[in-house]
Image: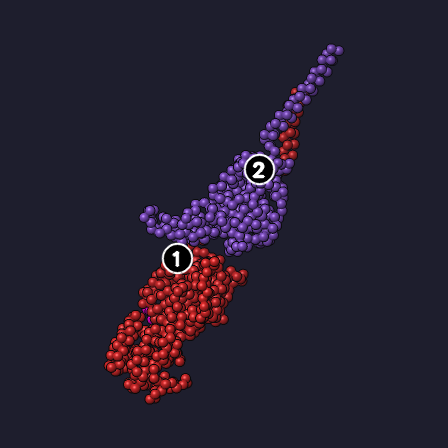
Chain colours: A purple, B red
């Protein structure tokens, strides 16, 4: 009898121990899987300013964060910019291309993805836009370098030391940069359309000479000629990014707010909303505010910038 | 219970959690697409500027008038290439300023240049230019789309000669010289202006509209910014019997753009055009119809020369002022440029022939001018400008008395011949004219009236 009771007790003790071990395994699994499979996040990065060289960290900090954190499963670029500095736009293009190697990047255009900001957009996997946005304006603008007259106050060792370049070479340099810009945009779009979307849409893309006119197209037209991939909202872009990354039940995190302002909710305030470029007539004054300006040559750098029609 | 269960159940639970979480959050994997890398070699290499400096040209007619009084959008220093060529060819550049009399300046001018004017020409100026062109003067119009807000003022003049500047710029995205605005042009109509040209390059140019006279045209890839269809772009035009040349661009005339392609050769051809005017003159153009190095001042009566010696000196000074050396003689050389001064009754046979060619015959107390009428001789001085078959100009001044000769020369040198002009080559001036003051250009605007005295109250 006593032996029988002992066997039953041992069995129950065994079951109890098994339950305890299983529960412990579940708890351990929960903790371990949270580390191994963190809650995926869609990171939002804002490209919503004139792209000043001096503000490069505004763009590179969130891009770096997205690349370095595995929980960022995909990135959505909220683009609303007329472009700006050529070199910073090129930096954005190359960084986004690198990020695309790690995780999907989807761009969504609010009112404008023009010139340098469109350059950034073409590095992404997919481009959405609002139908009334402006897309394109692929090209370069620049002032003409002034020839510094001989001076008794400032001594230079060569005729172009004071101005950087002859006017002719400056113009030719600008044309060379434009060629690189147009070629990169064309190659990216052709590859994206042929390999990542419906290949038949690749035939829609205009030739490089047409792209090089510097025209800004309304997004509906831009879609028809293959410059963007879809018309839709920011939410569409987020869902597309999640789909490309293969994630669901994800969180959305504002990487620009987090890394630049240390506040992921920074952009939820209306006070911090970007300007409406379509109604912003002061873009031309950017030339006067651009970096590296001198009295002799107010536009001393090349710009990938949309210039609005004169009033 | 088997011991293995203590391993299987927890392990299964562990896996279940992992599986559940991964299925909860993930539905697939991201396979990154390739990123096309930049291929710098695919960026078109740009050629060096084309062209090389060319020798200067020989000049024909020296004076070229350049307008600076109509808000012209250029600096004189910019045109050192063009003006240097003109100077090297023996030409002389004179500027028309705001206070200058255009009609008077055009009298000594072979070619008038108007560059990117942003101010319009008034009716008086337009008439003077039209008269200048009708006399064979040449007109060069230059547009510049990068400097003109509109082409209305330029067209106010160009339109008179069948040329309309379009408010546009031309460009070529397919083939250009470093920039889409640097348009290469190879389609030339046959002309001295296009002789020897293979290609020229404009840096930001208008297109032109002309019914005829298109000289340089764009190709099938040359667009006007006004139209989205290529072709039919005229860049340079020559109209009005080859006297009015319209250029669409100023920049190609300036350094270093003059060295591009055949621009230098084109500039040489333009300089030949500028210096090649063969214009006619009338009496009012005195003394500019004397364009040779020297002219004769002929007095066949020493008493008359003695009595009007001071006037003869003033005549010689007028010639000297324009670079013409005067040679005082007493006989007419029919083939020489000259000023002949004589009393009616003493005129030489050669003078008689010249006057007869002009339809002028003199009687004892009157003179007859063919197709105009009969006039009394006393107290008058006759001026007749004779052009020989060789194109040499001879001015005949005749009067009834030494006093009338002196008065006539005074009227001539004061530039008042227009007050007694009977035809472009004939004037009959009464001595009484000198008693009246010279009318001023403002007489029409300020008729005789009492000007109110300003008061302190304003």
Q: Nearer the viewer, residue B48 or B325?
A: B325
Which mark is in front, 1 or 2?
2
Residues rendered magenta in the picture:
B56-60
Residue at x 53% of width, y 44% of height = A49
What is the residue that sits farthest to the top in this orientation? A2
Q: Is residue B266 above or below residue B387?
A: above
Q: Secondary structure at mark 1?
A: loop
Question: Does A22 appear above or below B332?
Answer: above
Q: Is residue B110 left or right of residue B39?
A: left
Q: Chain of mark 2?
A: A
Q: Is residue B372 visible?
A: yes
Q: What residue did someone put label 2 on?
A: A266
Q: Secondary structure at mark 2?
A: helix
Kindly report the distance in space between the C-alpha atoms of the residues bearing marks 1 and 2. 53 Å
The answer to whether residue A118 is seen in the rendering is no
What x and y, as percent, mark residue A170?
42, 52
Whether discs 1 and 2 lie on one chain: the answer is no
Is B220 above or below relative to A123?
below
Provide the major secondary structure of the magenta segment. loop
> Which residue bears the numbered disc 1?
B49
Q: Is residue A87 above or below residue B201?
A: above
How crowded pointer 1 is (Cα within 10 Å; few <14, some 14-19, many 20+) is rated as some
Q: Is residue A252 magenta?
A: no
Drawn side of residue B158 relative to residue B293, left or right: right
- Farthest residue to the right: give it: A1
Q: Position of residue B229 (x, y in %)?
A: 53, 62
């Amino acid at each position: 009898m006593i032996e029988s009771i002992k066997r039953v007790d041992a069995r129950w003790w065994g079951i109890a121990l098994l339950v305890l071990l299983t529960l412990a395994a579940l708890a351990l699994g929960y903790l371990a899987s949270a580390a191994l499979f963190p809650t995926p996040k869609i990171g939002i990065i804002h490209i919503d300013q004139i792209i000043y060289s001096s503000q490069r960290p505004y763009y590179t900090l969130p891009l770096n964060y997205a690349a370095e954190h595995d929980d960022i499963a995909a990135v959505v670029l909220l683009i609303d910019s007329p472009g700006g500095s050529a070199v910073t736009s090129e930096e954005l293009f190359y960084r986004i291309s690198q990020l695309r190697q790690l995780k999907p990047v989807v761009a969504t255009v609010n009112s404008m993805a023009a010139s340098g900001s469109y350059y950034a957009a073409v590095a992404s996997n997919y481009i959405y836009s609002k139908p009334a946005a402006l897309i394109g304006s692929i090209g370069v603008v620049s002032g003409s370098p002034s020839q510094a007259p001989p001076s008794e106050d400032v001594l230079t060792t060569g005729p172009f030391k004071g101005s950087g370049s002859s006017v002719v070479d400056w113009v030719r340099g600008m044309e060379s940069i434009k060629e690189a810009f147009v070629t990169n945009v064309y190659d990216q779009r052709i590859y994206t359309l042929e390999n990542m979307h419906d290949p038949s849409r690749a035939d829609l893309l205009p030739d490089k000479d047409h792209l090089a006119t510097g025209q800004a197209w309304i997004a509906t037209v831009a879609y028809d000629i293959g410059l963007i991939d879809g018309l839709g909202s920011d939410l569409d872009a987020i869902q597309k990014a999640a789909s490309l990354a293969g994630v669901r039940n994800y969180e959305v995190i504002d990487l620009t707010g987090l890394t630049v302002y240390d506040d992921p909710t920074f952009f939820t305030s209306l006070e911090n909303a970007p300007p409406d470029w379509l109604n912003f007539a002061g873009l031309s004054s950017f030339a006067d505010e651009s970096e590296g300006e001198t009295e002799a040559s107010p536009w001393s750098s090349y710009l990938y910038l949309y210039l609005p029609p004169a009033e | 219970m088997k011991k293995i269960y203590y391993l299987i159940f927890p392990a299964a639970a562990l896996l279940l959690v992992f599986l559940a979480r991964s299925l909860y959050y993930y539905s697939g994997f991201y396979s990154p697409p390739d990123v096309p890398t930049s291929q710098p070699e695919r960026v078109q290499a740009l050629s060096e500027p084309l062209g090389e400096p060319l020798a200067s040209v020989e000049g024909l007619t020296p004076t070229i008038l350049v307008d600076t009084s109509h808000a012209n959008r250029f600096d004189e220093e910019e045109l050192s290439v063009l003006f240097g060529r003109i100077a090297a060819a023996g030409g002389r550049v004179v500027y028309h300023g705001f206070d200058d009399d255009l009609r008077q300046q055009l009298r000594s001018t072979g070619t008038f240049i108007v560059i990117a004017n942003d101010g319009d020409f008034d009716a008086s100026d337009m008439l003077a230019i039209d008269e200048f062109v009708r006399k064979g003067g040449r007109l060069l119009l230059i547009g510049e789309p990068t400097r003109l807000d509109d082409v209305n003022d330029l067209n106010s003049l160009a339109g008179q000669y069948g040329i309309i500047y379009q408010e546009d710029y031309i460009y070529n995205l397919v083939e250009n010289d470093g920039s889409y605005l640097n348009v290469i042009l190879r389609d030339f109509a046959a002309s001295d202006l296009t002789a020897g040209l293979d290609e020229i390059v404009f840096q930001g140019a208008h297109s032109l509209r002309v019914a005829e006279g298109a000289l340089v045209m764009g190709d099938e890839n040359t667009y006007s910014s006004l139209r989205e269809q290529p072709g039919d772009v005229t860049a340079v035009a020559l109209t009005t019997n080859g006297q009015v040349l319209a250029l669409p661009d100023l920049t190609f005339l300036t350094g270093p753009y003059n060295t591009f392609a055949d621009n230098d050769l084109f500039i040489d051809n333009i300089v030949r055009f500028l210096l090649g005017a063969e214009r006619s003159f009338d009496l009012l153009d005195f003394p500019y119809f004397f364009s040779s190095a020297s002219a004769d001042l002929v007095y066949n009566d020493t008493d008359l020369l003695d009595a009007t010696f001071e006037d003869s000196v003033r005549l010689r000074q007028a010639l000297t002022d324009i670079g013409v050396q005067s040679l005082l003689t007493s006989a007419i050389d029919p083939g020489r440029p000259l000023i002949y001064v004589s009393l009616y009754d003493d005129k030489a046979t050669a003078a008689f022939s010249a006057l007869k060619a002009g339809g002028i015959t003199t009687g004892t107390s009157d003179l007859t001018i063919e197709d105009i009428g009969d006039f009394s001789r006393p107290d008058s001085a006759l001026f007749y400008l004779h052009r020989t078959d060789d194109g040499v100009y001879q001015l005949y001044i005749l009067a009834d008395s030494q006093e009338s000769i002196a008065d006539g020369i005074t009227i001539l040198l004061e530039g008042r011949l227009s007050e007694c002009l009977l035809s472009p080559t004939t004037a009959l001036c009464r001595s009484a004219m000198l008693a009246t003051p010279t009318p001023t250009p403002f007489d029409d605007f300020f008729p005789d009236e009492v000007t109110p005295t300003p008061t302190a109250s304003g």
